[in-house]
Image (cartoon, rainbow, N blue to C red):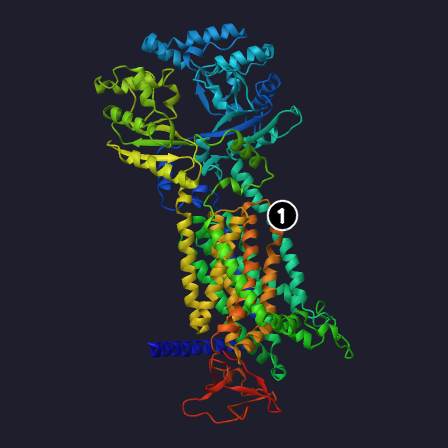
Amino acid sequence: MLETRQKMGKLLSAGSARLVRAMELTFNTYGRLIATSPIVVIVVCLVMAAGCGVGLLKFEQEDRPTKLWTPEGSESVRVEEWMEENFVSDTRLNMAIYVADNVLEKNVLLEMLRVHELVTTTTTSAGITWNTTCSTVPIIPSFSYGRRRRDAATVRQKRQTNSDFDFSRILPRDDYCQFQESIQEVCLENGLLDVFGYDRDFLTSLTREQILDEINDAQTSSITGFPLNVTQYLSQVRRDEQGYILGARAASHMWFTRVNRSALESGVGINDAGTGTQVDANTHEWEQTMVRNLLNPAQRPPEVQFYIMSASSFGTVGGENIQSDLQFLSLGFGVVFVFVVLMLGRRNHVEARPLLSLMGLSCVGLAIVVSYGTCSAYGVPYGPVNSILPFLLLGLGIDDMFVILEAWQSLSSEEQQQPLRERIGLALGRAGVAITVTSLTDFLAFAVGCTTVLPALRYFCIYSAIGIVSVYFFQATFFVACLTLDQRRLEDRRHGLFWCWKMSPEWSPSGCSQRDLCNEFFSRFYAKFLLHPAVRVIVILWTSALFFASTWGLTNLRQEFDPIWFLPQDSYLYGYFEKQRDYFPSSEEPGSVYLSNIDLANELVNIQELSESLRSNEYVAKVDSWVDKYVEYWDDAITANQTLFPDRLTQFLFSPRGAQYRSRNFRFNSTLSCREDAPLVTATRIDFSYKLLSSSREEVQAMDAVRTVVQGTNMSGETRVWGRAFSSWETNKVIKEELFRNLGIALVVVSVATMVLLASVVASSMVVLCVLFTLVDVAALIHWWGLTIDTVTCIDLVLAVGLCVDYAVHVAHTFLTRIGDRAQRAADTLATIGPPVLSGGFSTFLAFAFLANSSSYVFQSFFKIFFGVCVYGLYHGLVFLPVLLSLVGPASHNTITPQHLTPPHTTSSSSSHPLEQKNGKFVEKSLDAEGGGMSTDEKGNLEKGVGMFVVGGEGKVQQLHIT
């Protein structure tokens, strides 16, 4: 068994070594090709980016919640698609909340009336008014006489009289229908003012006691005649011992607008992100104008707090918030640019590299154009979470740039004497493998995310995967071409910023500018300190303690998703939802059961049984079934001849008792008329509401429980269940499963990729261990920072896999290329790769540091999670992993840099010789028939193997690069 493992290990090592050698040769050749014609390469890159950018002409932004956050193909998506075709609603809700010590005081009621009058007089620039955009309802006949000023006793007497009469049962059919046809329709709004008929004179004339009498006696609306329950518009109601209402802390008011279907059919429509439906432009503009008017506090009493939401507010505020926060990208770009300038060049006029730094950062811009353009060309929508993509690509692009520059600066003194073309090839040959490993693992992590059922996550992963490939290509091509031009400038002693300014022959850099403080820190201080035996013990113990503590935090991580989080906390809409949560919590989350292609006349009993089953369900608060009212209206509804049903249904729907269901709960295949039998019912619905649900798990259980009840009914036709919150509940149902699925697959894919490219099972396992530790620590940080498992954090954690693997892979790859004992190789690794890894991680942090001030939940979550990724990722990559490698690290790879990396036609004073070790010295030797050379054993001691050393003019080893 042990022998089999050893053979497998050797085969893996040999195969990977060949792959790495081939990659180094390819990158070496590619680098020399770029350096030969850098300007041509730059032009080609720009043309490629511009060509991909043409795809932006087909750019499409998706902001409908059900198309972003709801699992694709879920039951709620199918029901909503059916509703859009068969039961579309043209009514849109706009709502206000008033908060005061007592909202039943006259001054508060008068403020409500002032707001009502402001709404009714709101006019847009196109001349759209409340009367032209409101949703209308007919006045119930018993209330068609209008309101005249009268005292409270008269009002109560009239209400009592009206409650005893139903004119649809008293008047002859033709007379009643003629009366119905003469009834005026009024704009629909509901609230406490329905009690007073929106009559300023009447309300002003009432005393406080009379106002309370009116409110306590109210049974129907003084405007529409519909049943009225004033307590549904009040919160924190105060009553006396007999239940008499004395006051309330908050009140709500609703206005209903309607969608103009004719305008939509003519193409004048807007995709409303808040409702996920189409709305005509005029209605959308009126709603926004109304909000602007109502938010003006000029005449509002100081003791009254006012909060407003329109149907179009969510999409407008959410979209504006994410777009406005993109200013932080500019700030992050500026800060990162300064940092990159300081790190890439030296502190003097010639060796400073500001333009090269700018060109390196421009690779990110080119990658963004390619990603957005390509995805748009193929019809992949742009989601709101995609706004964080520039920050991601900025961090990854900088990391590649630092690795390439590190490879350039690590060229030996002999190699630096070679022509520029050869030096570029050597540098890219060494850096190419490293950036390929990290870019490939990043790409694979996002490729896994492309298979998710969550649309927003899938869109983001597709954009990111293409962006990562693009930034990898541009850094290895465009940036290398710019490096070639900048190095020509430097060797010609020209100014780093003003290339036309050539320095005098006497110019020489100061000694201070030649010091690399970061490299000195890692090589002289940090490596020695970290690898001290006592420090290594502390690191192992601390990492273990941190992991176990984070595991506890991970187990407490909650699962919850609320689209309201996407609103800025300083917006008027977020304030509204906060007050709604405080005073009008969703203890009665609405839902509906839709029935289609059903024989209603023969299914009344089954529908009644369905209503009773819903009422008895532990999660349902109440049921509003038109069938119950129909049976009350017609005493013999169940036993009567079913041929009478169409005629009776018409009478019921035009009666005071059934009028409220006419347009809300029925869809017919033709127009319903008061004088004729009801046409064929294509679909109808029963409404219900949920009880207060305390957790996302209970919400999912409630949703499934009602679906089970409905599926268990024995009715003809089709039944469907819909809930206003089902889209969020569906997401909560699958989000945890999707998160662990994507993370698990990403870790497996990354493990395989790193094992193949690193050619070491041990090193690959250590990299995966670091990634796993980082993910657990970050997940615990999410819990401690108040975040939950939702779509955004799911995206960020998948993102974290790709980012945190970079730090560990660079360290492991460098460790495998060093010779000596484990501690010596770990110290050499820190001195070599530590500075670029730290620079890359810190620059990534700088790129999104300003997001800490964002009011967007997307950007705030991104900052918190990536703060943890940078901190924990750098800790495990530059602290824990070097310690682990120094203790149980794998043996060094046994293949030394191929001869082709020092081409035979070079004019360098160095030459390539086969070497062997004798008496501790390297001497020339001839390769045997099998290509024997140099290798090391598990302790890092040199032994017989395969390899080439580059020897300088004095016979000293100038290059010893193990791949």
Residue 562 makes an appearance in the image: yes
Indicate whether 637 appears above or below 844: above
Indicate whether 202 appears above or below 712: above
Give x and y (percent) for residue 961: 53, 80
Amino acid under label 1?
Asn
Mark 1 element type:
helix
Residue drawn at point x = 33 percent, y = 28 percent: 616
Q: Please state if 149 lies on the left or on the right of 74 as rendered.
A: right
Q: Which one is in front, 365 or 96?
A: 96
Residue drawn at point x = 56 percent, y = 51 percent: 864
Task: Residue 99: name its quadrant.
Answer: top right
Indicate whether 899 appears above or below 719: below
Give x and y (percent) for residue 16: 42, 76
Residue drawn at point x = 62 percent, y = 18 percent: 107
Residue drawn at point x = 59 percent, y = 72 percent: 532
Q: Please state if 902 lies on the left or on the right of 617 as rendered.
A: right
Task: Residue 741: name its quadrant.
Answer: bottom left
Task: Residue 873: name its quadrant.
Answer: bottom right
Quadrant of the drawing holding the N terminus: bottom left
Give x and y (percent) for residue 517: 68, 70
Q: Which one is in front, 242 or 610?
A: 242
Indicate whether 161 appears above or below 679: above
**Residue under label 1:** 853
Give x and y (percent) for residue 529: 62, 70
Q: Please state if 293 lies on the left or on the right of 813 as rendered.
A: right
